[in-house]
Image: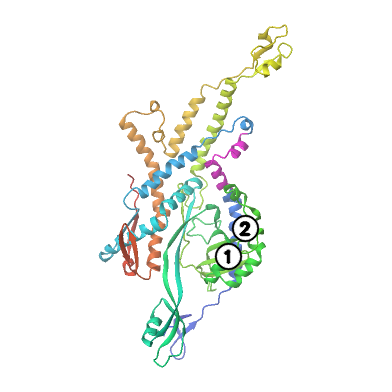
Amino acid sequence: MEPSSGQYVEDNLNSEGQPLILEKPAMNKEKIRKTILNDIQRANNFFTSKIEPVLRTRHQIYEADREYYKRRFKNTAGQSDFVSFDFWSMVQWAIPNVMNSFFGGDEAVVIVGRNQEDVPRAEILKELINFQLMTQNKGFLVLWDWFSDAFQYNLGAIKIWWERVEDWETEKMEYAGQDRIMMLQQSQWCEIEYISPPDMFGMCQVIYRIGRLKSNRPVIEPVRVTDLRWSPEAKSLRDANFVAHRQTVTADHLRRQAQSGIYDIEAVERAIQNSSGGAVIFNQFETELNDELDQNLNEEEGARSLFELFECYAKVDINGDGMLEDALISVVGDELLRVTENPFGRVPIFTLSPVRDPFKVLAQLSLSEIVGEVQTIKTALMRQLLINTATLNNMRWFIDPNGVDLKDIQENRQFIKVNNSNPSTAVYPFPTNSLAPWTMNLFEYLEGSLEQWTGRTRYNQGTDSKSLNKTATGISLLQQASNQRIDHIIRVFAETGVGEMLRFLVELNQRYIDQPQVIRLKNTMLEVSPDDLKGEFDIDVNTERE
C-alpha cells in the first residue's frame, strides 16, 4: 500500500518486495527566511531606484501637477501657473470606451462548454461568474479603477482571493437519544463539545456547536501599483520568481489572522514586539498621493499600531528536494508569519498595460510619455501666450518722475499734474512684441500629432465644426480610424488581464464551491451545485460596443 507521506521508487524494493520510502526533507525555515528577505530587499531597491520615479512622473503628468511644471519652467512660473490637461482628458475619453466594450452588451462573460454535457453547465457558470463579478464585487467600479491605473501608469493591477467565512454558534440539547447524537456526529456542520452520561431513560445532555457557511465567494480588490514589488529580472508577474503585495495592516489584523490559524501566533507576537522591524515608513510618493498620511502613526501603541506586511508569492525550494515550489509567504519585519504552498498555483494578481513590453513588467514607453510631450509644449506655449496677452492688455509705461506727479498716476486720479513739461515726453509705453505669427499653427500641429499618436479625434470633443470634415463619409472614416486605436487596446485588455481574471474565477469556483448554493438573480433563484461546475469550458470576453 502506498504510504500517505513520503515518496517511493518502484525500482528500489526491500527484501520483502515493498518499495523503499524516500522521506521528504524537512522544511528549512531559516534558509527560506534568508531567501525571502533578500528577495524583498532586492525588489524594494529595484522599485525605489527604477520603478517609483517613473510612476511618480506619470502621476504628475496625469494630474498636470503645477509643482512639476514649476520646476520645468522656472522663467514663467512666477507669471503664470497655467497647465494643460491633455493626458487627463485622453484617459477620461478612453475609459468610457473601454467600459462600454466590456459592459455595453448583455453580458460581460461568454462561456461555452467544450463537450455536449458541458453546454447546460456553461450557462449556469456564466450566470454565476457574472453575479460574482458585477454584484458581489461591484465589478463596474473595480474595473474602472483597474483601467484608470492602466492608462495612468501603464500598469493596472487587481488581486483575487477566495473568502470562506463560517458562522458557528453553541447550542444545548437537554434530552437527546443515541440516534439523535449519531445524526449530530455525522453532520459536517456540527461539532459536539460535551455529552453527559445517559440517564435512566438513555437520554443525554449534549452541548454542540452548529455552523453555517456565511460566505463562500471570490473577492476582487484593486491593488495600487505603488504596493507591488517584483524581482528585477521578471518579464511578467506570472513568470516572476518573486512577487509581493505590500500592505499596511494593524496589530489587530495580525492577531486575528493568527487566531484563525493563518499566521503563526508566536511569530506574530515577535513581529509586533519588534516594531522597529515592521513599522510602516511611507515614502515620498505615497505622501504625495495621500497628503493625510502621518509618519507619526507608528508611535501609537496597542492594537491600532501599523505594520508593513508583505504577502509574497515566490518560487522557492520549500522541502529541500532541489525543485522549486510555488509558495505563499507572509512577512512582517524579519519574521515569517506563514510559509505554505501557494494554493492558487500562480500569482493571483492580474495586470493591464495599454502599451506592452513583452520583456518587462512596466514598459518604459507609455501613453503618459507620448501625450506628456505635447502637454508640456502646450503648457509652455499657453503660458507665454497668456503672459503676452496680459502684458498687451495691461501695458507697462516709462515715466519721468520730474515731468508728472507719480502719486496722481498711482492713485488713478482723473487729473494728473504736469511739471512744466510735455506729457508725451514724460510718459511713453514700454515696447512689447506680439506673438510670432506661426504660434497658432504650432498649436494645430500639436493637436494633429496628439490625434495621430493616441487615436482620439476632435469629433469626440465637440470643437468647432468649421475646422472639420463636414461630409458624413469623412466623419465616419475619421471615427473608424479613431476606433481602431482604442479597439486595439480593448483587445489587448481582453486577451491579457481581463481574460486571465475570468479564467481564474472559473478555476476558483470549480475548486472551492463544495456544496450547493442558492443565488437570487434578477428576481429568480439560481441553484448552483458542485456538479454544475465540472467540465471543460472555453471562455471569451465580450468586447462588442453599442
- The reply to whether callout 2 and callout 1 are in contact (CB within 8 Å) is no
Q: Which mark's residue is nearer the viewer, 2 or 1? A: 1
Q: Between disc 2 and disc 1, whose residue precedes?
A: 1
Q: Residue type at mark 2?
A: Val
Residue drawn where x is 60% and y is 56% of the image = 44
On the question of residue 299 being in view, the answer is yes
Tag of residue 252:
1
The quarter of the image holding the C terminus is top left
Residue drawn at (63%, 60%), measured in percent from left and top? 279
Percent of width and height locating residue 90: 46, 40
Element class at badge 2: loop
Q: Which residue is mark 2?
A: 280
Residue 164: percent from left, percent from top:
44, 67
Does residue 368 lie above or below 198 as drawn?
above
Where residue 75 sits, quadrant-wise, is: top right
Q: Left or right: 273 with respect to 261? A: right
Decide which of 303, 138 is in the foreground and name it.
303
User: Residue 372, image x and y in percent?
Assistant: 52, 39
Residue positioned most to the right: 402
Alpha carbon distance from label 2 to label 1: 15 Å
Quarter of the N terminus within the rendering: bottom left
The crowd level at tag 1 (other Cα within 10 Å; few <14, some 14-19, many 20+) is: some
SS of the residue under disc 1: helix
Magenta range = 53-73
Prevailing secondary structure of the magenta residues: helix
Residue 519 percent coordinates (x, y): 34, 63
- The reply to whether residue 3 is visible in this rendering is no
Picture layout, residue 16 above or below residue 84: below
Nearer the observer, 141 or 120: 141
Q: Amino acid at mark 1?
A: Asp
Q: Magenta span has 472?
A: no
Residue visible at 53% across and 74% down in the picture: 319
